[in-house]
Image: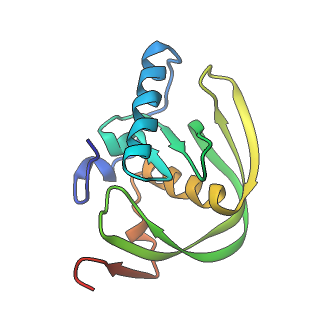
Amino acid sequence: MILTYPNNFLKKKTKSVNYFDKNLNEIVKKMKKIIVENNGVGLAANQIGLDMALFVARPKDKFYIFINPKILKGWEEEVKEEGCLSLPNKWGLVKRFNKIYLEYQDMRGKKKKLKTSGLLAHIIQHEVDHLNGILFINKAIEIYDLKNG
């Protein structure tokens, strides 16, 4: 089940992941399934009630797993439309970097670095915000409610 705003758990900073085991594999499997079932492009662990610095992104048909991510640098700001599985029927315009450089750990705990741009960079920033207890509505320039026009 996906937690929805205004659930206070979504406003909490998550804890670092220290165990890279079978349990972590099961959690990621469950998160991938939730993304597919809900037509999402990303899901942070705290959106399903887990206090873990972990998220899964799926900009197209490929899944990316990021554990204990840190954005090291970002450049080329742009404003894009954004939504969130924890805020059904809400969309907003959010200013984010088009290109980012980050470090994270993979499923085995190995440290990695990635330079990316476009939709994946946008998703990563949205999900890292989730892990820090920040929702896109806290950063949105404009918010639209699809239910109430």
Q: What's the colour scheme?
A: rainbow
Q: Quadrant of the N terminus?
A: top left
Q: Which residue is drawn at 69% across and 67% down?
A: 98
Query: Image quadrant of residue 45?
Result: top left
Q: At which x and y percent is residue 108?
A: 62, 19
Residue found 41% across the figure and 27% down from its top:
27
The image shows a total of numbered marks equal to: 0
* Relative horizontal placement of residue 47, taking residue 101 as reference (left or right): left
- Residue 121 in the image, given as x and y percentages of width and height: 65, 57
Task: Give the vertical position of 143 relative to 125 (above or below).
Answer: below
Residue 149 drawn at (x, y percent): 27, 86
Q: In this view, does 35 lie above or below 28?
A: below
Return the residue found at the far top. Answer: 22
Query: Observer-nearest residue: 16 or 83?
Result: 83
Image height of 92 relative to 57, above or below: below
Q: Residue furthest bottom?
A: 149
Is 33 situated left or right of 57 in this image?
A: left
Q: Nearer the viewer, residue 91 or 33?
A: 33
Image side of residue 94 versus residue 86, left or right? right
- Residue at screen point 73% across, 33% down: 112
Q: Which residue is drawn at 31% across and 51% down?
A: 10
Q: 90 or 40, which lies in front?
A: 40
Q: How far from the left and from the top, in percent, is residue 95?
A: 57, 74
